[in-house]
Image (tube, helix red, strand yellow):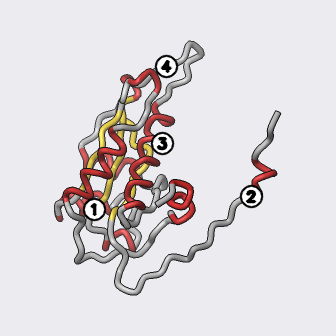
């Protein structure tokens, strides 16, 4: 698939087939896309947590208790360490940028494999940190379910974006 076509076809999915697990090779491809993502000064201050055991899924789902998340067979959590990220002289810390790029790479890789995702940033931090036993200096920027859509599911195919000329300026 052409790269722009891949980007155009990707949309947030909120319906998953709970009985259809994703093949390990496909999961590895998705995670490899994140591993290969660029980061500031190549510090790679991240770790990708693939939640797949029934016990851990139960714990992690509590941080964002939506009915559609309960059916996803996997949840990907992208975490990083603020102390390991590149910092600019003015104090800017690149952790969120680095984690965003890695997450975007993995979401697009999932789309290429026909795997649904939904970027989630509105989770309850305390619940997630307790479930994953995360430390104070760690950051979770986002998580996403990973799963196939149920039989007969159809994407909406609707992307509402501002016009090209409104967001692009040639100077």
How far apart, in angstroms, are the residues tagged by discs 4 and 2?
33 Å
- Quadrant assignment for the C terminus: top right
Position of residue 73 relative to residue 95, above or below, is: below
Q: Nearer the viewer, residue 24 or 16?
A: 24
The first of marks 4 and 1 along the sequence is 1
Residue 134 x %, y %: 28, 40
How far apart, in angstroms, are the residues tagged by discs 3 and 1?
19 Å
On residue 74, the disc is 1
Q: Which residue is mark 3?
A: 100
Instruction: Residue at the far top: name it.
Output: 89
Q: Nearer the viewer, residue 108 or 5?
A: 5
Q: Which residue is mark 2?
A: 162
Neighbour tally class for label 2: few under 14, some 14-19, many 20 plus, Cα within 10 Å: few
Left or right: 165, with 94 as reference point: right
Q: Quadrant of residue 38?
A: top left
Which residue is at a point 42% across and 42% down the rendered structure image? 102
Q: Are marks 3 and 2 in contact (CB under 8 Å)?
A: no
Q: Nearer the viewer, mark 4 or mark 2?
A: 2
Q: Are marks 3 and 1 in contact (CB under 8 Å)?
A: no
How far apart, in angstroms, are the residues tagged by discs 3 and 2?
22 Å
Residue at disc 2, secondary structure: loop
The first of marks 3 and 1 along the sequence is 1
Q: Are marks 4 and 2 in contact (CB under 8 Å)?
A: no
How far apart, in angstroms, are the residues tagged by discs 2 and 1?
33 Å
Residue at disc 1, secondary structure: strand
The first of marks 3 and 2 along the sequence is 3
Residue at disc 3, secondary structure: helix
Which residue is at a point 59% across and 16% down the rendered structure image? 90
Neighbour tally class for label 4: few under 14, some 14-19, many 20 plus, Cα within 10 Å: some
On residue 5, the disc is none
The first of marks 3 and 4 along the sequence is 4
On residue 87, the disc is 4
């Amino acid at each position: 698939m052409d790269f722009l076509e891949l980007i155009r076809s990707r949309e947030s999915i909120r319906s998953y087939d709970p009985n259809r697990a994703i093949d390990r090779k496909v999961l590895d491809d998705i995670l490899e896309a994140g591993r290969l993502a660029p980061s500031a000064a190549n510090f790679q201050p991240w770790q990708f947590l693939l939640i797949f055991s029934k016990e851990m899924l139960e714990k992690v789902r509590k941080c964002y208790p939506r009915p559609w998340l309960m059916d996803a067979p996997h949840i990907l959590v992208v975490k990083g360490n603020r102390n390991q990220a590149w910092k600019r002289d003015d104090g800017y810390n690149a952790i969120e940028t680095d984690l965003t790029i890695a997450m975007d790479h993995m979401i697009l890789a999932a789309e290429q494999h026909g795997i649904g995702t939904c970027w989630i940033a509105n989770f309850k931090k305390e619940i997630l940190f307790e479930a994953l036993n995360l430390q104070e200096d760690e950051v979770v920027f986002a998580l996403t379910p990973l799963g196939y859509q149920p039989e007969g599911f159809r994407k909406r195919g609707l992307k509402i974006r501002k016009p090209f000329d409104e967001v692009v300026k040639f100077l």
